[in-house]
């Protein structure tokens, strides 16, 4: 599967996105339907899990602070009180998933921001790159 993070294309991935050395997002497409399935751990600034998605369903939602809106081809995780988009993912084509927008903490307490043009963690950023991962994980940070 190919995964886009901002404007960066990661070809031939296993669907795992590791951020600062920790597998934080797993993306899969249901074999029979092509439906998007996202597993994601959301941390606070000190590394505590505050929300967890498993196969695009909220399993942990501390203080019911988060909301997920999904269709078979898209997922949007938001924090309604602040209006913040935590995670937005869409199936762009068969076997291509785009992570186009988001902002959340890594397990190390840093903030990762994803926009249509780049991803950035503190001063580290990437824009417009293409990588063939030969079946490996996407590594950010």
Image (spheres, rainbow, N blue to C red):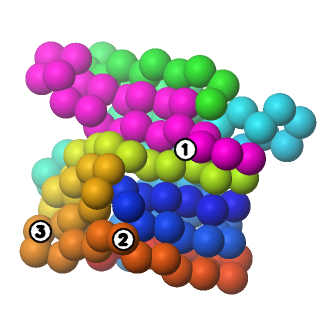
- Residue at 68 percent across and 72 percent down: it is 12
- Along the polypeptide, which appears first: circle 3 or circle 1? 1
Q: Is residue 109 left or right of residue 58?
A: left
- Residue at 83 percent across and 32 percent down: it is 33
Q: Disc 3 designates what residue?
A: 122
- Along the polypeptide, which appears first: circle 2 or circle 3? 3
Can you tell which of label 2 and label 1 is closer to the viewer?
2
Using the numbered discs, state the Cα–Cα distance from disc 2 to disc 3 in whole angstroms.
Answer: 18 Å
Query: At which x and y percent is residue 71?
Result: 59, 21
Q: How would you rate the neighbour count of disc 2 (Cα within 10 Å): few for under 14, some for 14-19, many for 20 or more?
A: few
Q: Quadrant of the N terminus?
A: bottom right
Residue 43 seen in the current view: no
Q: Disc 1 designates what residue?
A: 39
Query: At which x and y percent is residue 6?
Result: 36, 57
Can you tell which of label 3 and label 1 is closer to the viewer?
3
Camera-side residue of 44 and 34 = 34
- Residue at 36 percent across and 19 percent down: it is 67
Q: Is residue 113 left or right of residue 10?
A: left
Q: Disc 2 designates what residue?
A: 128
Query: At which x and y percent is residue 19?
Result: 36, 67
Count of numbered circles on the image: 3
* For the residues bearing labels 2 and 1, Cβ distance under 8 angstroms: no
Camera-side residue of 110 and 70 = 70
Q: In the figure, residue 54 lies in which quadrant? A: top right
Query: At which x and y percent is residue 80?
Result: 22, 17
Q: Is residue 22 left or right of residue 2?
A: left
Mainly helix, strand or loop, the magenta region? strand
């Amino acid at each position: 599967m190919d995964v886009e993070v901002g404007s960066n294309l990661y070809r031939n991935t296993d669907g795992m996105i590791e951020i600062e050395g920790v597998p934080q997002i797993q993306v899969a497409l249901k074999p029979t339907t092509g439906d998007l399935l996202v597993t994601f751990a959301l941390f606070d600034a000190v590394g505590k899990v505050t929300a967890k998605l498993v196969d695009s369903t909220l399993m942990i939602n501390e203080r019911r602070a988060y909301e997920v809106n999904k269709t078979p081809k898209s997922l949007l995780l938001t924090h309604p009180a602040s209006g913040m988009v935590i995670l937005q993912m869409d199936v762009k084509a068969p076997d291509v998933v785009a992570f186009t927008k988001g902002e959340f903490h890594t397990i190390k307490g840093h903030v990762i921001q994803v926009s249509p043009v780049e991803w950035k963690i503190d001063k580290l950023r990437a824009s417009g790159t293409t990588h063939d991962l030969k079946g490996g994980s996407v590594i950010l940070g």
